[in-house]
Image (spheres, helix red, strand yellow):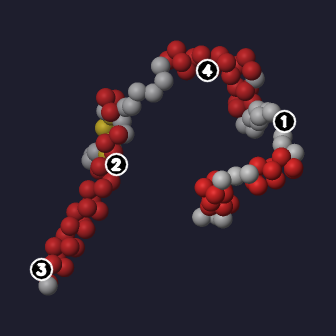
Amino acid sequence: MRFDKFALVTVAAISALALPTLSQATSIYHAAGGEAGFTYHPDHATNGKARTEVLAELEAARKDGTLALIQRGAPLPIKNAGPAKTRQQVIDEMRNESPEQRRARMELTAGG
């Protein structure tokens, strides 16, 4: 019995020490001893958007004015999703929903 507890504690300690190093596998910076504190591995970086895609998005943000809002820290305007539903339309939708849709809606509104 004593050996089992020792083995369990050993496995837990090794796991606790190994987990932080496993999470660095996808990072381009890895912790290292010494004065540097880290090493740089650009080959571990995930490929995101191409430079041309980023420049195209930047130009689009300049044209529609969102870049200026972001630079000032202002909130972005909400895009209009169309006309709102009337109260009667919402009530009719709720009356005509299937039992699966009702259960899903109730789970969302129940808070957990």
Q: Secondary structure at mark 4?
A: helix
Q: Nearer the viewer, mark 4 or mark 1?
A: 1
User: Which residue is identified by label 3?
Assistant: 3
Mark 4 or mark 2: whose residue is earlier in sequence: 2
The residue sitting at 70% across, 52% down in the picture is 97
Q: Which residue is mark 1?
A: 83
Residue 40 spot, x, y in % from top left: 33, 34
Q: Amino acid at mark 4?
A: Glu
**Nearer the N terminus, badge 1 or badge 2?**
2
Between 105 and 17, the residue placed more toward the observer is: 105
Furthest-left residue in this view: 3
Quarter occupied by the N terminus: bottom left
Q: Position of residue 59 (x, y in %)?
A: 65, 16
| The quarter of the displayed image where residue 102 is located | bottom right
Residue 57: image tag: 4
Q: Is residue 108 visible?
A: no
Instruction: Give the alpha-carbon distance from disc 4 to disc 3, as whole Å.
Output: 61 Å
